[in-house]
Image: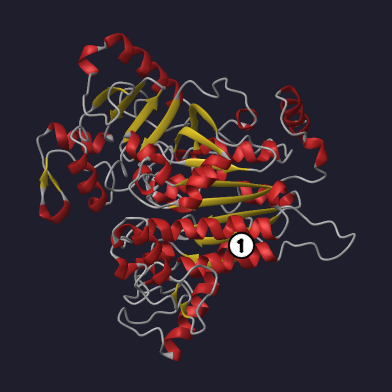
Amino acid sequence: MNLIRTFFWLLCLGGPVLAERTTSPNVVFILTDDQSWDSIGFLGGKVHTPRLDRMAKEGMQLTDFNVTSTVCSPSRYSFLTGRYAGRCKAPRFMTEHPPGDQTQVENIGELELEGWNLAKLLQKHGYQTGFVGKSHVVNHHWFHGRWEGTGLESYPVDADPRDPVVNAKMRRNHRRWCEAIKPYGFDYVDGVYAANLKELQNATLNVHNLDWTVSKALQFLEAQKSQGAGTKRAPFFLYFSTTLHHGPAPWANRFSLESDPRFTGEGFVPEGFDVLPSRADVLRRNKDAGFADNKAFALWLDDGVGALIDKVRELGMERDTLILFTSDHGSWRHGKATLYDFGLRVPMVLQWPGRIKPGSQYNGLLANIDLAPTILDLCGIQPPKDYIMDGVSFAPQIFGDRSPVREVLFGELGHSRMVKTQDWKYIAVRYPKNLQERIDRGMTFKGFDGATLKRPYLTRNGHLGHYASRKNPHYFESDQLFHLKSDVEEIRNVYERHPMVVQQMKAHLLNALKQFENRPFGEFVPTP
């Protein structure tokens, strides 16, 4: 039924007819890390990103695309499931937040092994599914300590990956991570970073390696070629997630372009990789374009995106493949670990030659929870009744429909919740009962680097809380209202000046919170 409806949209809108297709579309989903608008050229960033700029010209830009939580794990969870991260039922999340507890959504959520997600459902319907790059959505308990009981093999933080004994451990650890991810719906898993680079627990490997991850993605794409005349090729879904532009700061080239490309997430690979322009060439082209060396990381990522697009075209799959590019949230320099727009709003570009009108835009409110239902809709797959999704499909908007998909968007991060329309945003900060009692008694809280706080950070992670609160002056305020049209940077809290708007936005928030069974939040949903 969904495929028929998509066909009808294309006929009505005068677009290319989907009847040419005999199979569901391939999907390449490119997800970057901590990437704000200012690291992309076509959005006004002072960087050189010719392939992304071209992708926007040849495809479609969603100008008000948001994530619903602005740190890695919950955002990625929502992209892959179509659910708000506060719905997570994975063991770590439920241990931290048993029923009746106010959730503190941040980097504790994981994909549910027994539950549905996008890849698992696509796999069930005959898709070949691939996972390459950063995870941060499974087995959080494997990240820290000495790895006892995990099957991972430890080594000193200053160990040399070129040492054959050390390198063998790193290879086996990487393979163990790959095998751990496969049961979540992936046929091919390689080039994996468990989370951020520091989780490798080795100083030498604490460097970005786009060459390595791109090489693994190209191997997956190459394997999707038809096996011979008369062979029907299965459609594919590739989830490609980079560590760029997360820390260690890629603009400090010792962590990126000046590092040894043979140091990877699986240890030392002596043969290296030949899938991207040389790193010296990246620096040269960046300088020729008029930019300083500390901006070259953006061009490096741009080359990686271009390599995936070129491979799809080289394999003759361009007209059968939807390619999407976006980020998990904005950078720490702006709104990461907050519910402000510089963290929530992320670039989203879609390319599908012959299907998506070049240079088109959709300016309505959309979010990461909408991605999974959209892809399933385009693939003609009806989710099973036990697949809970909060998102809605924006497939009609891809093909020209400009009606609003949603009027209100809900977001959650730590001790804060928000609702957003295209004109207004309301943020509520409410602490669990035990913390609020301490605040009311005038007790203080320990902050980052020994700071003393009157209120605790919104997140458990004091490092994130420190930078988020330092960059955003309203961070700790209980009630915040911003007029987004006139105050893009959310500098002026006008909560006291617009009581009627506040009343309406609070009603929207209450309506959103009612979706979360047995999850209190301040006076909106009192503690049982």
Which quarter of the figure has residue 159?
bottom left
The quarter of the picture where the C terminus appears is: top left
Q: Compare residues 7 and 470 and report the one nearer the observer.
A: 7
Is residue 208 shown to the viewer in this render? yes
Q: Compare residues 342 and 441 and report the one nearer the observer.
A: 342
Q: Kindly identify the residue that appears in the image at 44 percent across and 53 percent down.
A: 92
Total count of labels? 1
Q: Is residue 381 above or below residue 108?
A: above
**Residue type highlighted by circle 1:** Lys
Percent x, y of residue 40: 40, 47
Which quarter of the figure has residue 37?
top left
Q: Is residue 398 above or below residue 485?
A: below
Is residue 129 shown to the viewer in this render? no
| Outermost residue, top side | 500
Q: Is residue 267 left or right of residue 182?
A: left
Q: Kindly identify the residue that appears in the image at 43 percent across and 50 percent down.
A: 73
Q: Is residue 95 left or right of residue 429?
A: right
Percent x, y of residue 260: 39, 77
What is the image's colouring?
A: secondary structure
Percent x, y of residue 397: 60, 28
| Callout 1 secondary element | helix
Percent x, y of residue 41: 40, 46
Location of mark 1 (residue): 182
Q: Is residue 87 above or below residue 112?
A: above
Q: Is residue 497 above or below residue 356?
A: above
The quarter of the picture where the N terminus appears is: top right
| Outermost residue, bottom side | 164
| Outermost residue, right side | 230
How many other residues sit within 10 Å of disc 1, few (<14), some (14-19) or many (≥20)? some
